[in-house]
Image (cartoon, helix red, strand yellow):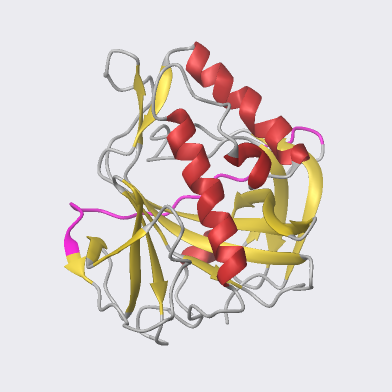
Amino acid sequence: MAVASRMQAVVACALVVLAGCDGGSGSAPATDVSVADAITTVAASSTTGVSTTIEVTTTGPTTTIAATTVPGQLGLSPDGPWHLVDSAPGVEGVGLVYELMPRLWVFLPTEVDLERGYLWTFNEEDRPIIEAYLMAVLTRYRSTDSVPATLDDPGWDLYYTPELKALVVPQYQAFSDRGIYADLDLGVVLRPRLTEDERSEDRAILLDCVSDGAVARTADGEYAPGATPGVVAHGYAFEMAKVDEAWKASGYNDEVSACSAG
């Protein structure tokens, strides 16, 4: 698998634009995570705390392609806030497609597909980590899709470590104070996968190639300064930590290899 062979959290704060600025959508500041492998190196500066910018090019309009869903018991927990659907924008392959909220989906492959780069397949062992990650992303979007932002969502405590929450929430509050919110616009599709790199009982590395059609808007509905509408592929590496028997997001960074086939 062409993924990072090593991933270490460092004491830094990576400031990336909320949504749709400087090339599509982005993320809130977080505990920076550096990832290195033979394909790419993404590292944070110990003096500036600014992460390397990823440039992933995708062009053309997003199309909706039906994905094959797999019947049976394999899937996300039935009591979660998601529901199984037949398709999501741009998704193809054999797997499960869930809608988490309007215009936010996740695709979980259930068959290896070398052509599309699907080497990891959804499984029961990884399900709790995947679900915690999805809840963390869902918390982010449902907290920041309006002005003022609703940053008292319990998900910030349930699915983020206290350290990561302390870095992320104030920055989203600052966006809200400026009258900026995240509009999912053309839709966001998550494609998370777990790696075996430094995997342990209480730590896991998750890569996600996000098809990101979100955009930042001002309170009056106009594009925020620097917002660029469209759909862009963004690669991320997330560190997930098990805290008091619950999986939580503890750090993340840009990772271009998350969108590399193989």
The tally of labels here is 0
Spot occupied by residue 55 in the image (x, y as percentages of width and height):
46, 50
Residue 223 found in image quarter: top left
Spot occupied by residue 148 in the image (x, y as percentages of width and height):
45, 16
Q: Tell me the magenta residue range.
A: 47-64
Residue 232 visible from this viewpoint:
yes
Magenta stretch secondary structure, dominant: loop
Residue at x-position 79% and y-position 72%: 201
Residue 85 found in image quarter: bottom left
Image check: 29 left or right of 181? right
Residue 244 found in image quarter: bottom right
Q: In this picture, is 58 found above or below 119?
A: above
Pick the front one: 192 or 256 = 192
Q: Is residue 246 magenta?
A: no
Spot occupied by residue 251 in the image (x, y as percentages of width and height):
70, 49
Image check: 25 left or right of 158? left
Residue at x-position 73% and y-position 44%: 161
Q: Is residue 49 magenta?
A: yes
Quadrant of the frame with the N terminus: bottom right
Q: In this picture, is 238 found above or below 215?
A: below
Pick the front one: 256 or 239 = 239
Residue 255 visible from this viewpoint:
no
Spot occupied by residue 239 in the image (x, y as percentages of width and height):
69, 57
Residue at x-position 51% and y-position 55%: 134
